[in-house]
């Protein structure tokens, strides 16, 4: 993507190839562009090539491209203005993000939360922390930078993964989300542009909106990042290790190309899922490729979300700056939870292999059940993380989620993960249920999908607390 938001025509031709060659050419172009818009791979507001330029790149007549553009203008997916070119838009009747707060009804399965039960080792960690806390009880219990023992444990954990770290390069936070808020507060001001993946973890988008920053889309799929913007920004947020929700894990070459292409002053890499690598070998941490990279991590996914312990890893001077930003809203993280996290990180080699094995079993059970009951739903098998990013045969994920909610299954459809409310052909399905429950859940999901041919009802779909 060029600095003025124009999609490079050669890249757009490459993205359109799956739709070309079947049926009338203008329909293939229109269908392909519409699908790319709905999937979020052409960001809302981006500028597409002119009819003349694009017809030349496609080796088609100009009238063919003009006819395709006319269809999409009529449908509301494109708009043109003199001097401003043709830009991607979204029809007024397109599916919207389901941000409704939970209504208190009982859910048999809540798949809006991609998180695991506590590991058995947590009991031993709690017992150890209860003993270790005694020397601290005579003091105030506040450690603004984090408990020294935990900072050392995080530094050792990161160093073992290949990102050499000392304890004074670590700031302890109340989870990865607080870390992201701190970084937005420290490095940006209202109106600044922030690069963010599309799709991405919903709370990342919510935080950008809360701080009144503007988003620049970095489209991503299970195969990697696409169309890295040439726009200079203050901050970028990327997740190369088990991207939420696609499950994408970047290899070393992809990581190297990304940091070279990004024009951001600070690149934030979220490694929340880095310890849940299910297949293959780990790549180098993104922080080893570029000095602009700040690393965010958390205990929430690989260990237990109930701890609410995360961290930021950066240069010592940056950590001091971030500690001042954190102090404006929060003094310190809870002491007992920090001691529990310290014990778990020191015993990570014992805890994590079983966690990964359990997640693989859940993943295999879910994919087997989907293949049996919903064989026309497509997905890439994720190499890390806790979810499948599932593509439905046609748009309607929001309606599927609405029907599922009525029978006790809470889901998050694709629009919740997008900057602009697109991707209504997608659902995120966390594989957090034990294998003996999966078939029942997928049966309910299949039944809900079968109901979407009926007239859509008003959606009261998901909680805004999707994680």
Image (tube, rainbow, N blue to C red):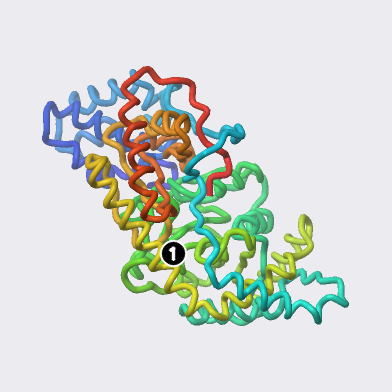
Q: Secondary structure at mark 1?
A: helix
Which quadrant would residue 141 be assigned to in this image? bottom right
Indicate whether 9 appears above or below 395: below
Front residue of 9/384: it is 384
Indicate whether 156 appears above or below 181: below
Estimate the x, y position of residue 164 in percent, counting from the top left.
53, 81
Estimate the x, y position of residue 183 in percent, counting from the top left.
64, 58
Left or right of 72, for residue 336: right
Front residue of 425/13: it is 425
Which quadrant would residue 106 be assigned to in this image? top right
- Report the residue at 76% width, 77% height from top: 133
Residue most toward the front?
A: 436
Left or right of 171, for residue 193: left
Indicate whether 233 appears above or below 353: above
Indicate whether 132 appears above or below 226: below
Left or right of 63, for residue 201: right
- Report the residue at 67% width, 78% height from top: 128
Q: Is residue 87 visible?
A: no
Front residue of 406/219: it is 406
Left or right of 86, for residue 374: left
Q: Which residue is mark 1?
A: 259
Front residue of 19/155: it is 155
Q: Is residue 359 visible?
A: yes
- The mark tally for this picture is 1
Which quadrant would residue 385 be assigned to in this image? bottom left
Estimate the x, y position of residue 282 in percent, counting from the top left.
38, 73
Estimate the x, y position of residue 98 in percent, counting from the top left.
51, 33
């Amino acid at each position: 993507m060029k600095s003025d938001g124009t999609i490079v025509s050669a890249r757009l031709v490459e993205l359109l190839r799956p739709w070309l060659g079947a049926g009338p050419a203008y329909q293939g172009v229109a269908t392909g562009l519409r699908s790319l818009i709905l999937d979020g791979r052409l960001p809302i507001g981006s500028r597409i090539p002119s009819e003349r330029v694009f017809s030349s790149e496609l080796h088609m007549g100009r009238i063919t491209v003009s006819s395709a553009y006319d269809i999409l203008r009529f449908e509301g997916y494109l708009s043109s203005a003199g001097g401003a070119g043709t830009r991607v838009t979204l029809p007024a009747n397109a599916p919207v993000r389901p941000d409704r707060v939970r209504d208190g009804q009982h859910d048999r399965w809540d798949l809006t939360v991609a998180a695991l039960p506590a590991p058995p080792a947590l009991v031993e960690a709690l017992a150890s922390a209860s003993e270790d806390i005694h020397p601290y009880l005579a003091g105030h219990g506040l450690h603004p930078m984090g408990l020294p023992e935990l900072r050392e444990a995080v530094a050792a954990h990161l160093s073992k993964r290949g990102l050499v770290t000392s304890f004074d390069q670590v700031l302890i936070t109340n989870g990865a989300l607080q870390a992201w808020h701190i970084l937005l507060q420290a490095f940006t001001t209202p109106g600044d542009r922030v690069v963010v993946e599309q799709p991405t973890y919903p709370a990342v988008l919510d935080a950008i909106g809360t701080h009144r920053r503007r988003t620049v889309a970095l489209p991503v799929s299970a195969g990697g990042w696409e169309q890295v913007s040439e726009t200079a920004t203050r901050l970028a947020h990327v997740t190369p290790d088990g991207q939420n929700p696609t499950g994408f894990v970047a290899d070393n070459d992809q990581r190297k190309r990304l940091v070279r292409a990004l024009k951001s002053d600070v690149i934030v890499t979220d490694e929340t899922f880095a310890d849940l690598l299910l297949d293959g070998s780990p790549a180098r941490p993104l922080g080893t490729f570029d000095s602009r990279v700040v690393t965010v991590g958390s205990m929430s996914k690989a260990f237990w979300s109930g701890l609410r312990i995360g961290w930021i890893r950066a240069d010592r001077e940056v950590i001091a700056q971030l500690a001042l930003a954190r102090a404006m809203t929060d003094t310190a993280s809870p002491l007992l939870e920090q001691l529990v996290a310290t014990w778990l990180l020191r015993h990570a080699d014992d805890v994590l292999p079983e966690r990964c094995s359990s997640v693989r079993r859940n993943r295999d059970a879910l994919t087997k059940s989907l293949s049996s009951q919903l064989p026309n739903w497509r997905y890439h098998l994720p190499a890390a993380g806790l979810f499948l990013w599932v593509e439905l045969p046609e748009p309607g994920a929001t309606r599927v989620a609405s029907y599922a909610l009525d029978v006790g299954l809470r889901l998050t459809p694709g629009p919740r993960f997008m900057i602009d409310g697109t991707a209504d052909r997608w659902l995120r399905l966390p594989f957090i249920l034990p294998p003996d429950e999966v078939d029942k859940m997928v049966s309910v999901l299949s039944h809900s999908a079968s109901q979407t041919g009926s007239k859509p009802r008003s959606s009261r779909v998901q909680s805004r607390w999707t994680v």
